[in-house]
Image (cartoon, rainbow, N blue to C red):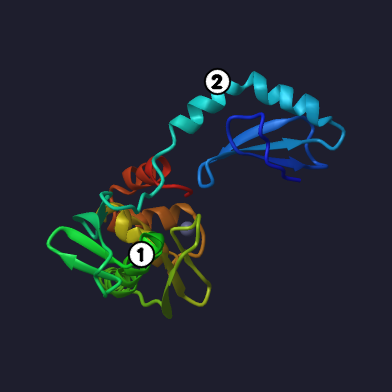
Amino acid sequence: MSAPDDALPWPVFWRRSTRARRVSLRIDPIERRVIVTCPPSIALKRAKAFLAQHRSWIDEKLAALPDALSLAPGSNLVLNDQSLVLSHAPEQRRPASLDGDRLIIGGPIERFEARAVCFLRQIAGMTLPEQLRRHAASMACTPSSIVCSAARTRWGSCTRTGKIMLNWRLVLMPATVRDYVIIHELAHLIHFDHSQAFWQHVERFHPERREAQNWLRHHARGS
Ligand SMILES: [Zn+2]
């Protein structure tokens, strides 16, 4: 159940749930919208009134969300710890090139963001596996394979067969946070759970794992 709502100042996703006892709302930080869950018996009008009552809370929560990744001419980003500014050169034939601290994207402006993402994903594909292998060597474990993904909400994952997935967006995070995600997934090769033994193993290789987790909670879209 979802419909655009002109009367409300933010995008709202309406969900009917047979398990819901009352109307509840939460903020979806990835899509930057409000998710409202209603029991089947509640009239839409009442649910909307509920939403109106919580208007200032919603305004506050949405305003506090970190900025979405902006990939436009002039935006700044940090790629594998190097600060870069994006610039546009319509006449440039190469989709993307690096010149000092400038990442220059060629071609029409409509393709700008897609080309920038493509370049960043290429860099991720080249650098993340290498960083993972370096950590794997110091942790004395070996993943069966490494994949870079574009998942929207997961920064990493590990399967029972030892296949590790890392999100390409990790290249845009501080090194300590990236290291934490990599070490977390590698630790799953030894402990396939989130037991105390697992966290002890993570902390052996990343003593500041709580700071990294906090950073992800506050800065990254999704978790
Ligand atoms: Zn885990």
At horizontal 55% and vertical 20% (from top left) the residue drawn is: 56
Precedes in sequence: disc 1 or disc 2: 2
Residue 129 image offset from top left, x and y in percent: 32, 74
In the picture of the structure, the residue carrying the numbered disc 1 is 108
Tell me, for residue 212, which label it has, or none: none
Q: Seen from this angle, which residue lies furthest bottom?
A: 144
| Horizontal side of residue 192 vs 75, given as left or right | right
| Horizontal side of residue 24 vs 65, given as left or right | right
Q: Secondary structure at mark 2?
A: helix
| Circles 1 and 2: CB atoms closer than 8 Å | no
Q: Nearer the viewer, residue 100 or 27?
A: 100
Q: Nearer the viewer, residue 167 or 181?
A: 167
* Badge 1 density bin: few <14, some 14–19, many ≥20, Cα 10 Å: some
Using the image, determine if residue 212 lies above or below residue 172.
above
In the picture of the structure, the residue carrying the numbered disc 2 is 56
At horizontal 18% and vertical 59% (from top left) the residue drawn is: 102
Question: Which quadrant holds residue 98?
Answer: bottom left
Residue 50 image offset from top left, x and y in percent: 71, 23
Q: Secondary structure at mark 1?
A: loop
